[in-house]
């Protein structure tokens, strides 16, 4: 596929099934495998996924013609918005934990069942099996698969619980809004089916410290993307005539530019909307509940451990007494924590990370402990310990537990004592030790001002008194 010569619109190197048009006639075909050309093609509105042919409502061909994946222009935008709205309601961390707890050995079924369950669909296991049948015909341009047709018909009325099938409900031909929403839910589940299991398989194959990130970079689940020119265009200086089948070799393109972000999840305007969810499910399957939630950029636990609140730069100091800073901060944290005993179980998100009452207490505690260990080691002339924290990137099952009055009491005793240790330790340091501190790193005065910003974690959860909710959910 890698072709060092510039392709022309009539190159036959890429002619395959995509080179045939809806009538079966051979269409001109061209392939691109250079990063710059592939990204230009993905962004070009003249190049759209091969359009799907129409079919009776509720069948496989109709499904393909109705989902965002094979649509273009305004229809694509509207249908994609419907998928994005569905995905926005799904908490990636909950998906990760559900995937980790999943029992099905067949990862395809597990991934789709987890999503179906999170969407609130009845019979999620049966839905996942039906989606598997649909998936095998989904990327086939002229699907002739009666079993897949039957699976679409079975799934359709089950996609929007609360709207009855039949009279006036999903499946009524004229009811475009609901039918399209239902079709795009099937589309969402089908897209998740094979791609996510392939990601898991490739990650297992690639291995290493961060197998998912490595697979996305070196062994991408989606290697080739197909487009059709709806009008004449030019890609990387190459004229592409209307009707041309275009093959984009993503795997080759990203292999050629290791310095640029991988294209594994596609690119705007069709960037995979399920990438965060896919990474969460893959992490759950691969690493179990004790793993971490990766970011959509594939951030690893190692990246997460570099977390520093609030800034990587040396913290600003002022003339406040460092010994008083940590107790004041802890008082602020405990005042917020006192409002958390009625927490409704919905995590809050700040700076792309999820926070719960238990997690906030854990992070404040660990942050104080981490820098205290650093300070004591440096005072004793000992090396500091290597950083293996998962920090805020991990949300553990314990973080998701209810925050009871007993938990609040324990947090109060724990944090108050930690604050006291900090306070007593800093109070006996000389100005010399505070500002020209032994060992490498920030001065101890700077460390004190830094840890005094740990209220960040508590602020992420916010004031949960019913009339005072301060966090965005
Ligand atoms: C929870 C799992 C997933 C869901 C719900 C999901 C959903 C979707 C949807 C609905 C689209 C169509 C978007 C549009 O047309 O605007 C899409 C596109 C795409 N997805 Fe995903 N996906 C998932 C997993 C994955 C995985 C694991 C990969 C590969 C690593 C992937 C790669 C892609 C790519 C490359 C596209 C763009 C295709 C193109 O431009 O032709 N997806 N995804």
Image (spheres, helix red, strand yellow):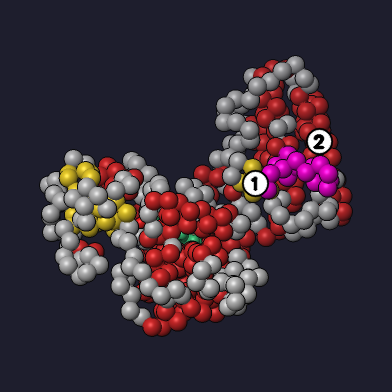
- Residue 468 falls inside the magenta stretch: yes
**Residue 5 relative to residue 125: left or right:** left
Residue placed most toward the observer, 135 or 312: 135
**Residue 105 relative to residue 56: left or right:** right
Instruction: Please provide the residue range marked out in magenta.
Output: 458-473
Does residue 70 lie above or below 360 as drawn? below
Counting from the top left corner in percent of width and height, residue 143 is at 33, 75
Residue placed most toward the observer, 226 or 253: 226
Counting from the top left corner in percent of width and height, residue 7 is at 14, 49
Q: Which labelled disc corresponds to residue 349?
A: 1
Which quarter of the figure has residue 125?
bottom right
Label 1 close to label 2 by CB (< 8 Å): no
User: Ligand 1 is found in which quarter of the picture?
Assistant: bottom left
Query: Are there few (<14), some (14-19), or many (20+) residues within 10 Å of tag 2?
Result: some
**Residue 435 relative to residue 180: left or right:** right
Tell me if I can see residue 141 in this picture.
yes
**Residue 415 relative to residue 443: left or right:** right
Residue at (33% x, 57% y) in the render: 49
Q: Quadrant of the N terminus?
A: bottom left
Q: Which residue position holds label 2?
A: 332
């Amino acid at each position: 596929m890698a072709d060092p010569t510039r392709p022309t619109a009539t190159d036959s190197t890429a002619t395959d099934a995509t080179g045939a048009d809806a009538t079966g006639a051979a269409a001109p075909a061209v392939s691109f495998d250079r990063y710059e050309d592939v990204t230009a093609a993905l962004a070009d509105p003249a190049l759209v996924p091969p359009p799907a042919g129409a079919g009776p409502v509720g069948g496989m061909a109709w499904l393909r013609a109705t989902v965002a994946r094979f649509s273009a222009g305004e229809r694509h935008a509207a249908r994609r918005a419907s998928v994005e709205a569905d995905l926005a309601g799904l908490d990636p961390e909950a998906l990760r934990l559900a995937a980790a707890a999943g029992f099905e050995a067949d990862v395809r079924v597990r991934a789709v069942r987890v999503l179906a369950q999170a969407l609130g669909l009845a019979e999620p296991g049966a839905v996942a099996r039906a989606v598997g049948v649909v998936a095998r015909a989904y990327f086939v341009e002229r699907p002739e698969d009666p079993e897949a047709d039957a699976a679409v018909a079975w799934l359709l009325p089950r996609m929007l619980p609360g709207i009855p099938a039949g009279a006036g409900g999903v499946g009524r031909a004229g009811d475009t809004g609901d039918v399209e929403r239902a079709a795009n839910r099937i589309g969402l589940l089908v897209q998740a089916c094979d791609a996510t299991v392939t990601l898991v398989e490739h990650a297992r194959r690639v291995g290493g410290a961060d197998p998912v990130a490595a697979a996305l970079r070196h062994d991408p689940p989606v290697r080739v993307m197909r487009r059709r020119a709806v009008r004449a265009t030019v890609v990387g200086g190459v004229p592409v005539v209307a009707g041309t089948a275009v093959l984009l070799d993503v795997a080759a393109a990203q292999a050629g530019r290791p310095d640029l972000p991988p294209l594994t999840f596609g690119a705007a305007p069709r960037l995979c909307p399920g990438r965060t969810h896919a990474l969460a499910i893959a992490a759950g399957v691969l690493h179990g509940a004790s793993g971490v939630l990766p970011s959509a950029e594939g951030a690893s636990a190692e990246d997460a451990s570099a977390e520093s609140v609030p800034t990587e730069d040396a913290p600003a100091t002022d003339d406040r007494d460092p010994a008083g800073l940590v107790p004041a901060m802890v008082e602020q944290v405990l005042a917020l924590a006192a409002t958390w005993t009625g927490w409704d179980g919905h995590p809050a998100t700040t700076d792309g990370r999820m926070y719960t009452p238990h997690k906030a207490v854990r992070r404040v505690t660990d942050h104080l402990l981490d820098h205290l260990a650093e300070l004591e080691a440096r005072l004793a002339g000992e090396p500091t310990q290597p950083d293996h924290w998962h920090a805020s990137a991990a949300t553990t099952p314990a973080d998701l537990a209810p925050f009871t009055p007993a938990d609040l009491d324990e947090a109060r005793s724990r944090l108050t004592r930690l604050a006291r240790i900090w306070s007593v330790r800093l109070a006996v340091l000389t100005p010399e030790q505070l500002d020209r501190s032994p060992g490498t790193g920030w001065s101890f005065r700077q460390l004190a001002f830094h840890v005094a910003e740990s209220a960040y974690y508590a602020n992420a959860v916010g004031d949960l008194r019913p009339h005072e909710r301060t966090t965005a959910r």
